[in-house]
Image (tube, rainbow, N blue to C red):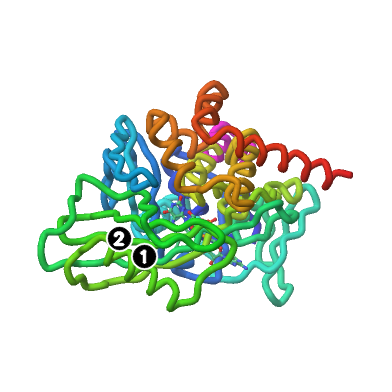
Amino acid sequence: MDVDLALIGFGGATSLLLSALDRRGVRGLRIATVDPEPAHGHHRTWAFWTGAEDELDPVLDAAWSQVDLYGPSGLRQLALAPMRYAMVQSGPVFQRADEAAARLGVKVVTASAAALSDNGKIVTVRDDDGKTIIRAQWALDSRPAAPARPGRTFWLQHFRGWWVRADTDVFDPASAILMDFRTRQPAHGVSFGYVLPTGRRTALIEYTEFSPARLDDAGYSRALRAYLQLLDLPELTVEKVEDGAIPMTDAPFAVRPSPRVVRLGTAGGATRPSTGYTFSAMRRQADQIAAALAAGGDPVPGPAYPRRHLWMDGVALRAWDRGLVAAPAFFERLFTRNPPDRVLRFLDGLTSPAEELALMASTPLLPMTRAAAGDLLARLQTRS
Ligand SMILES: Cc1cc2nc3c(=O)[nH]c(=O)nc-3n(C[C@H](O)[C@H](O)[C@H](O)COP(=O)(O)OP(=O)(O)OC[C@H]3O[C@@H](n4cnc5c(N)ncnc54)[C@H](O)[C@@H]3O)c2cc1C
């Protein structure tokens, strides 16, 4: 099959891209998707920051303009306006993408793409048997991929969440718990719980760690049960379980492995190293690609995050990993010494250098300076 665009992997990044192409009115392109999982990989829940209005509003599970943060000095309530913290299931996002794909005349290929070879003009996509399945002008590849080279810190954001239902009204749907550091802290890394209510009786409650390795099954269940006890909630029914692990690393991802192959999503560096948030950057890049194609250009997005943000994240990861700064105090200071919307725009990669100086000044300066010096030294050593 010969196409203009081969979208390799039909998960989050490709779904958002198809919707963006449709929204921008891009027509007349020959597009194919390739994914071995007909239902777009695994179901998941996406939480992200957004403004007062969002085109996903009709399908959001919930959105909160106020969130709680339980840090070392107790409870802080953060008013997020003009921003909101929002939650959407992957199901409706995939459904919108399927509808967009139908309107765009996309060929959906259920196969595993094992290899892409790029001669500078055409990308040939082969399956596991080495058979050519597609030849494309461009391939946008969101298959999972390891970083291009090892980082100086490699952590994971790993978590388990329970979708719970109560018999009585126990949640306040107007307010979520964003980070609750009262959980038992791991020896190496940081843990927190959070509560995202979707109604008075329903919520997603998660236990999350930022640390080098995953727990075993019993470890997550124990941690979640302990967190529920701490919240002092009545008996709850667990209706669904969600877990996963997202890379948190200063390792670089190869975003353009060859002239006509562009990596998207987590594989393309859209995951924010200091938080694991990915959704907003994927959406932003999807829109950039759609805008470029609508204008007759190449489907190449801008970087997911500015380089200086990646440097700041690398320093923060180093500070937490080497025990120079405790992450709970770090996040508490960040959120309470800055207007919340500045922090949220920073986490989405959208702040100006002046705002970033203010953000840096609000973190513990001496240990962060030590972490920055360590980072610089490690970079110089890698180069020599
Ligand atoms: C459980 C979970 C919850 C998350 N929650 C959030 C959140 O709340 N907020 C946030 O910002 N980020 C979140 N993330 C991070 C990120 O947003 C998601 O991982 C997102 O799905 C990444 O999109 P993607 O397209 O890069 O990868 P995926 O959505 O994983 O898509 C990759 C696709 O590649 C396909 N594939 C694999 N191998 C091949 C092959 N050989 N050939 C063809 N296709 C192949 C897979 O089947 C899959 O469909 C979460 C991640 C997980 C795992």
Tag 2 or tag 1, which sits nearer the N-term? 1
Q: Residues within 10 Å of mark 2 (few under 14, many from 20)?
A: many
Dot label at residue 71:
none
Quadrant of the rendering where the N terminus is positioned: bottom right
Picture coordinates of residue 73, whole percent (x, y): 36, 43
Q: Nearer the viewer, residue 316 or 268?
A: 316
* Residue displayed at 18% across by 50% down: 172
Cα distance in 3D space between marks 1 and 2: 6 Å
Residue 299 magenta-highlighted: yes
Where's residue 246, x and y in %? Answer: 53, 59
User: Along the line of sight, which residue is nearer the eye, 357 or 345?
Assistant: 357
Does mark 2 have its CB less than 8 Å from ligand 1?
no
- Picture quarter with the C terminus: top right
Q: Residue at x 56, y 52 (%)?
A: 265
- Residue 137 showing in the rendered view: no
Q: Position of residue 146 (x, y in %)?
A: 67, 60
The image's mark for residue 161 is: 1
In this rendering, the answer to whether 250 lies above or below 308 is: below
Residue 122 in the figure: left or right of residue 25? right
Q: Magenta segment, principal secondary structure?
A: loop
Image coordinates for residue 322, horizontal then vertical, percent = 64, 51
Give the residue drawn at x 64%, y 44%. Answer: 314
Name the residue beneath numbered marker 2.
Answer: 204
Q: Is any atom of residue 184 visible in this view? A: yes
Q: Is the residue 271 above or below the residue 205 in the image? A: above
Secondary structure, mark 2, is strand
Instruction: State the extent of the magenta-drawn residues as a range.
Output: 289-303
Residue at the extreme right of the image, as rendered: 384
Dot 1 amino acid type: Gly
Mark 1 in CB contact with mark 2 (< 8 angstroms): yes
Near-viewer residue (166 or 370): 370
The crowd level at tag 1 (other Cα within 10 Å; few <14, some 14-19, many 20+) is many
